[in-house]
Image: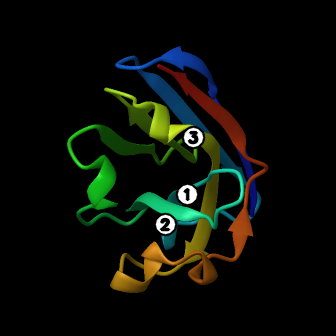
Amino acid sequence: VQLQASGGGLVQAGGSLRLSCAASGRTSISYVMGWFRQAPGKRREFRAAISWGGGTPYYADAVKGRFTISKDIANHTVWLQMNSLKPEDTAVYFCAATPGTLRPMIIYESEYEYWGQGTQVTVSS
């Protein structure tokens, strides 16, 4: 599976961005798609995940109520709508994919087999 992330940019605090992740290759309904972020000098942190096959998406506590993950199965695309952005949301955002269904372990980056190249999100104060 190849993943192409896009949609990052510079936005003022309180603004919004919409990230997209297009999957190609061996796509199927049995993948979980996740979004992680990595700030300079820090490890990757889970933000949200959704399954092609359904189920309630997972969100990190820090983004609940501000971020929404959604999917377009026909076009193998996942979006991360980010609202009420804060300067601390600044990071490189990565999409990732792992076979299977939603499960508690999908908040850990080690669960994911495939990664996109990352897209920079910068929130100014």
Q: Nearer the viewer, mark 3 or mark 1?
A: 1
Provide the residue designation for mark 2: 29
Above or below — where is 98 with respect to 95? Answer: below
Callout 3: SS: loop
The residues tagged by marks 1 and 2 sit, at their Cα atoms, a distance apart of 21 Å
Snapshot colouring: rainbow
- Residue sitting at x 69%, y 77%: 113
Q: Nearer the viewer, mark 1 or mark 2?
A: 1
Whole-percent x, y for residue 81 in the image: 40, 33
- Residue sitting at x 32%, y 48%: 63
Whole-percent x, y for residue 105 in the image: 42, 85
Judge left or right: residue 69 versus residue 37: left
Which is more toward the observer, 69 or 37? 37
Callout 1: SS: strand
Provide the residue designation for mark 1: 36
First in sequence: mark 1 or mark 2?
Answer: 2
First in sequence: mark 3 or mark 1?
Answer: 1
Q: Quadrant of the N terminus?
A: bottom right
Give, as a three-letter code, the residue at label 3: Asn
The local crowd at label 3, few if under 14, some if 14 to 19, many if 20 or more residues have their Cα within 10 Å, is: few
Judge left or right: residue 1 versus residue 7: right
Above or below — where is 32 with respect to 23? Answer: below
Provide the residue designation for mark 3: 75
The residues tagged by marks 3 and 2 sit, at their Cα atoms, a distance apart of 12 Å
Which is more toward the observer, 110 or 99? 110
Give, as a three-letter code, the residue at label 1: Phe
